[in-house]
Image (spheres, grey):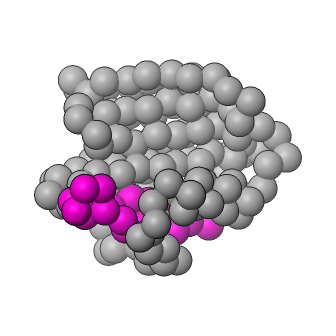
């Protein structure tokens, strides 16, 4: 594992995964990808943006793109619940609202997640997606990435 730091936020990522950084009016986004169309991304939201509003905005963007989008309230797996417990214990981060998504692209099922995490006075928006073939292989890495988020000054 390797560490990456941006704008006061740190995350651990698998060696060899591609990292890109983008600054927009919506905040700073870092995307981590094993290659292909699968990715995990974290956006440091501007001060004052509410977590539930950020989740709804992203969900609406997916709805506009995919007619067959299925949205469910986030239901963490046992591994995800354990990752959230570790996240809180190690980093003093608080998991916030989120949703699970499913849709298809050219008849290929795709799964995704939208989550929020609060660390100190910073709200982070986490999104990830992979096709159904790769999801089971990547979900543990996505949860590890989310679980590694911390304020850079914590170390």
* Residue 81 shows up from this direction: no
Instruction: Please tell me in which quadrant of the rendered image residue 79 appears.
Output: bottom left
At a point 31% along the width and 34% down the height, the residue shown is: 33
Instruction: Please tell me in which quadrant of the rendered image residue 61 appears.
Output: bottom right
Q: Nearer the viewer, residue 139 or 112?
A: 112
At a point 21% along the width and 60% down the height, the residue shown is: 108
Q: Which residues are magenta?
A: 95-114
Q: Nearer the viewer, residue 124 or 90?
A: 124
Describe residue 129's horizontal placement relative to residue 10 as left or right. left
Q: Name above or below for residue 127 compared with residue 83.
A: above
Q: Nearer the viewer, residue 139 or 101?
A: 101
Our reading of the magenta stretch's main secondary structure is: strand
At a point 17% along the width and 53% down the height, the residue shown is: 134
Residue furthest to the right in view is 48
Q: Name above or below for residue 95 compared with residue 124.
A: below
Measured as percent of width and height from the top left, residue 147 is found at 43, 50
At a point 14% along the width and 58% down the height, the residue shown is: 133
């Amino acid at each position: 594992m390797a560490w990456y730091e941006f704008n006061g936020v740190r995350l651990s990522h698998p060696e060899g995964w591609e990292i890109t950084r983008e600054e927009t009016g919506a905040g700073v986004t870092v995307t981590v990808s094993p290659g292909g169309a699968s990715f995990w991304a974290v956006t440091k939201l501007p001060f004052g943006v509410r977590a539930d509003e950020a989740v709804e905005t992203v969900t609406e963007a997916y709805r506009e793109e995919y007619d067959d989008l299925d949205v469910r309230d986030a239901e963490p797996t046992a591994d995800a619940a354990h990752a959230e417990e570790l996240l809180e214990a190690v980093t003093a981060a608080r998991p916030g609202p989120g949703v699970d998504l499913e849709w298809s692209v050219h008849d290929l099922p795709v799964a995704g997640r939208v989550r929020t995490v609060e660390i100190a006075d910073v709200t982070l928006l986490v999104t990830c997606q992979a096709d159904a073939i790769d999801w089971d292989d990547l979900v543990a890495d996505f949860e590890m990435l989310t679980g590694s988020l911390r304020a850079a000054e914590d170390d």
